[in-house]
Image (cartoon, coloured by chain):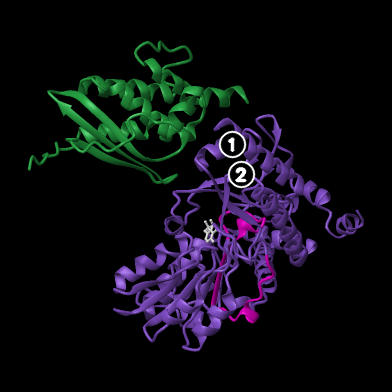
Amino acid sequence: MKSGIINKTIYDVDKIRKDFPILESMIHGKPLCYLDNAATTQKPKSVIASDVNYYTHLNSNIHRGVHSLSEAATKAYEDARIRVQKFINASSEKEIIFTRGTTESINLVAQTLGRSILKEGDEIIISTMEHHSNIVPWQLIAAEKKAKIKIIPIIDKGDLILDEYRKLLSPKTKIVSVVYVSNSLGTINDVETIISLAHKQNIPVLLDAAQAVNHLPVDVQKLDCDFLAFSGHKLYGPTGIGVLYGKSHYLESMPPYQGGGDMISKVTFEETTFNSLPYKFEAGTSNIAGTIGLGAAIDYVNTIGINNIAAYEHKLLEYATEELLKINGLRIIGQSDNKCSLISFVLDNIHPHDVGTFLDFEGIAIRTGHHCTQPLMDRFGVPATSRASFGLYNTKYEVDILAAGIKKIIEVFK
Amino acid sequence: MDSELRELYQQVILDHNKSPRNFKKLENANFEAEGYNPLCGDRIDIFLVVEDDIIKDISFQGSGCAISKASASLMTHMLKGKSRKEAEELFVKFHDLITGKLGDNPSLDELGKLAVFAGVKEFPARVKCASLAWHTMHSALNKEEKVISTE
Ligand SMILES: Cc1ncc(COP(=O)(O)O)c(C=O)c1O
């Protein structure tokens, strides 16, 4: 096959797999087939090495010392910020705030912007397919401010109904916060339309990009989103580090999130002046090693190229969809025409939990459950699904293993 | 199939999963409770008819994995005719079995058919599945008795 050879020279997945030591693991005597990338991705050697290097050669506190180690650590930390800025094409590194992850990024916006602008009767728009981390933070602040949450509905295929969204937008709407790519359905939402409609009424839009940055090129200036949140650990980076991008005029106007060291410029017992961006939002000693590790992860993704990853994963998704749909009694939940590389499915009369345990014995790691999207499960009338989610190192062969594993379970439960 | 997996999914469990016993609502139940496992979204309702401290009838409804469904099915089968005290004692014993507290060669006489759940101890993540029905039964029995309307 000629095309196969050409692809191989562009995207050498065998070579890529060698960068991820964990992929050599054996599980129950079978080679690990890791298909739980939407939960977290594995880490390449360069990211692991970054951690070792930091603690071996750089460890010290940042922004505080005049000694050499502190200066070197500060530089590495700030270099990572610039990598993130370039990766999502923010106009300034001041718009990049490091957090613990997507969850903290969204909480930050809810607790600062939300707290300062919401009044009784105001409305926040989210969608049916939100992760709990883009529901609960809004519920907390809405309850406090007596504001309401409005939900964009979806069709059975798994796409948002934008006509209904249009109707929800009103002078009462103060914030729109939606998921870019659904972690349960794989749907890539039409966020450009969502943003431009909100902007006609000057409403800020936050994008939960936890499942987007690892699968698609993301350009915050082109999208024109006002906030964007993501986690390092889903982008082949460490856990405990994430990003909040925010347009500087919003960030400037927002009160601080937490108080402490680093986020101040002057403190007396009477009064405190807050530090400038982005430090105003980074109180206390941050996850320095994790931040530098995130920079290494972005370097890694850049060497392969996010467009190449997107194209490769798309082919893998097409193949997996085709193969899984051949299985009798398997139904895919989320069949949008515009999807990222994950497949949620249910089997007739076999509970996802049993599927998960059986596949584990084939060495296959998938996620089973509600995927932190319980309202979405209710919408589809299922308590849970099984979800296979693919990353840049997965192969067609692994899809075949998955399909064979599923067929085996169906046989046992016959 | 792997032997550990076969231990977990014994034929009896697969059978009870496919055709659960006492899978219905008891209209005349004087004790009932709803159990919920937020981890996996499993929901179960347990219904009991208790007279003179004896479980005259017991049933369940709900959705869940094979382990939780078979466990509920076998539990209802085992508890019919038992006293409340016996039911609670069996729960303790069962819980010890699935959490591995009975050791490697437990005496399984009292447990009867419940012995098929011995394999669960190798799967800590599945202990909740196997015990959900029992916890729900326990909470039903410890609730206030429902006043059955005679109208
Ligand atoms: C769409 C989406 N949003 C938010 C999150 C929360 O991310 P984290 O747990 O890293 O904060 C996740 C991850 O599970 C996700 O998939």
**Residue B105 image point, x, y percent:** 47, 11
Quarter of the figure with residue A298:
bottom right
**Do marks 1 and 2 share a subunit?**
yes
Q: Is mark 2 within 8 Å of ligand 1?
A: no
**Residue B15 image point, x, y percent:** 47, 27
Q: List the residue tagged with mark 2.
A: A328
Q: What is the residue that sits farthest to the left in this orientation?
A: B151
- Rendered residue at 51%/23% (across/down): B10
Q: Which kind of residue does numbered mark 2 sit on?
A: Asn
Marks 1 & 2, CB-CB < 8 Å contact = yes
Quarter of the figure with residue A224:
bottom right
Q: Is residue B14 left or right of residue A389?
A: left
Quarter of the image with the C terminus of chain A in it? top right
Q: List the residue tagged with mark 1.
A: A410
Instruction: Tell me, yes or no, whether the highlighted magenta stretch contains residue B53.
Output: no
Q: CA distance from mark 1 to mark 2?
A: 9 Å
The answer to which of B91 and A408 lies nearer the viewer is: A408
Q: Nearer the viewer, mark 1 or mark 2?
A: 2
Instruction: State the SS at label 1.
Output: helix
Q: Is residue A91 visible?
A: no
What is chain A's hue in the picture?
purple
Q: Is residue A171 visible?
A: yes
The chain that appears green in the image is B
The answer to which of A152 and A49 lies nearer the viewer is: A152
Instruction: Tell me, yes or no, whether the highlighted magenta stretch contains residue A240.
Output: yes
Q: Which kind of residue does numbered mark 1 sit on?
A: Ile
* Magenta-tinted stretch: A216-241
Judge the density around disc 1: few (<14), some (14-19), many (≥20) Cα neighbours within 10 Å.
some
Instruction: State the SS at label 2.
Output: loop
Figure check: B37 above or below A284: above
Figure check: B81 above or below B58: above
